Image (tube, rainbow, N blue to C red):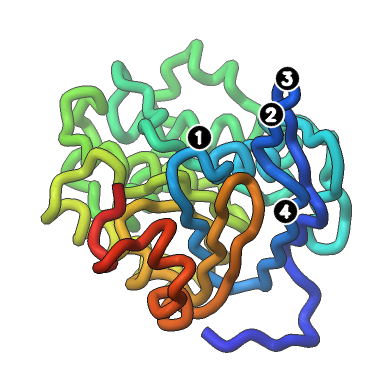
Amino acid sequence: MPMDQTQQPLLEATGVTKQFAGFVAVNAVSLSLRAGERRALIGPNGAGKTTLFNLLSGRLAPNGGDVKLSGESILGLPAHAICKRGIARTFQITSVYTKLTALQNVQTALFAKRGHLHSLLRKASGVCVDEARSYLELVGLTHLAGAIAGEISYGDQKRLELAMVMSLEPSLLLFDEPTAGVENQARRELVALIKDLCTRKALTLLFCEHDMDAVFSIADRITVLHQGRVLTEGTPEEIQNNPQVREIYLGSSHGRAA
C-alpha cells in the first residue's frame, strides 16, 4: 500500500535500546509506521523482536530512545495506559480465558476497555452481548459463542483473541507470531482473515512472524532485525531478493524459517 510521505507517522520509535545485565537485546532501533501500513518484523531467534514489541507496548521500559504515537511520546507509560491510547497487542501463546465461553471472553475485553471489570462479579450475562457477538461475527466465530474457550481448537482460540483485540478499537495492532502453533489449513485461513480485516477496517499492523508465506502475503513493508539492530527494511520483493537477508535468515527458499 503506497504511503503519503508527508503524513505524520502513527508510530515512531527513535534509537530505542534495551539492556539486560549488560546484554543489549535491542540496540538503537528506529522504526516508523504510517496509518494503514502493514509492517512485518522478521529476524532469527534472539534478534530482539519480542523485546521490541514489549518496549513499544509498555511491558518493558527502554534504557534509551523514544517512542511516539501520533506525535506524542508514550515513553514510560504503563501497558494499560498505552492500550488506552490505541495500541493493542497479541502474544505468541493465546491469552484467552480458557474457562469462559467465547462470548464471555469478548465481553471481558469490552468491560476492560470501559473500566467495568467489576461487572465480571455479576457474570454479566446480559451486558454487551450484541456488541460482543458482533466481534465474534467479525472473525467467523458466531457459531462458537457459547463454547468454552479452552475446548475449542487452537486456531479458533487465535481468532477469539483477535476478536478481543478488535473490540478495543485500536489504532495500531501488534501481533506477535499470529500463526504460531496453528496447523496449515487454519494458518492459511487466519492469514486471509488478518488481510481481510486490515483492508476492511483500514488497520495499521506491526507483526512478527516466522512463516514467510504469511509475511510476504500480509506485509506492505518488512523490517529485518539481526542481533538487536535493524539490518535493513524494504518491500517484500526487496527483502526476498536481498543477499544479506537470505544468508542470515531466509536461506535458499522463503519457506518457514527455522
* Residue 174 picture location, percent across and down: 54, 50
* Residue 132 picture location, percent across and down: 40, 43
- Could you give the CA–CA distance between mark 1 and mark 3, rounded to whole angstroms? 35 Å
Q: Amino acid at mark 1?
A: Ala
- Could you give the CA–CA distance between mark 2 and mark 1, rounded to whole angstroms? 36 Å
| Residue at 79% from the left image edge and 36% from the top image edge | 62
Q: Is residue 191 above or below residue 23?
A: below
Mark 1, Cα crowd under 10 Å, few <14 / some 14-19 / many 20+, is many
Q: Amino acid at mark 3?
A: Ala
Residue that label 1 marks: 109
The mark lying in front, picked from 1 and 4, is 4
Residue that label 3 marks: 21
Q: Amino acid at mark 2?
A: Phe
Q: Which badge, 2 or 1, comes first in the chain's sequence?
A: 2
Q: Which badge, 3 or 4, comes first in the chain's sequence?
A: 3
* Residues marked 2 and 3 touching at CB (< 8 Å): yes
- Could you give the CA–CA distance between mark 4 and mark 2, rounded to whole angstroms? 15 Å
Position of 152 with respect to 35 (left or right) is: left
Asked which quadrant contains residue 206, the reply is bottom right
Q: Is residue 107 above or below residue 227?
A: above
- Could you give the CA–CA distance between mark 3 and mark 4, rounded to whole angstroms? 19 Å
Q: Which badge, 1 or 4, comes first in the chain's sequence?
A: 4
Residue that label 2 marks: 23
Residue that label 4 marks: 29
| Residue at 85% from the left image edge and 47% from the top image edge | 65
Q: Is residue 83 something one can see in this rendering?
A: no
Q: Amino acid at mark 4?
A: Val
Mark 4, Cα crowd under 10 Å, few <14 / some 14-19 / many 20+, is many
Q: Secondary structure at mark 3?
A: loop
Q: Is residue 247 something one can see in this rendering?
A: yes
- Could you give the CA–CA distance between mark 2 and mark 3, rounded to whole angstroms? 6 Å
Between 124 and 188, the one lying in front of the other is 188
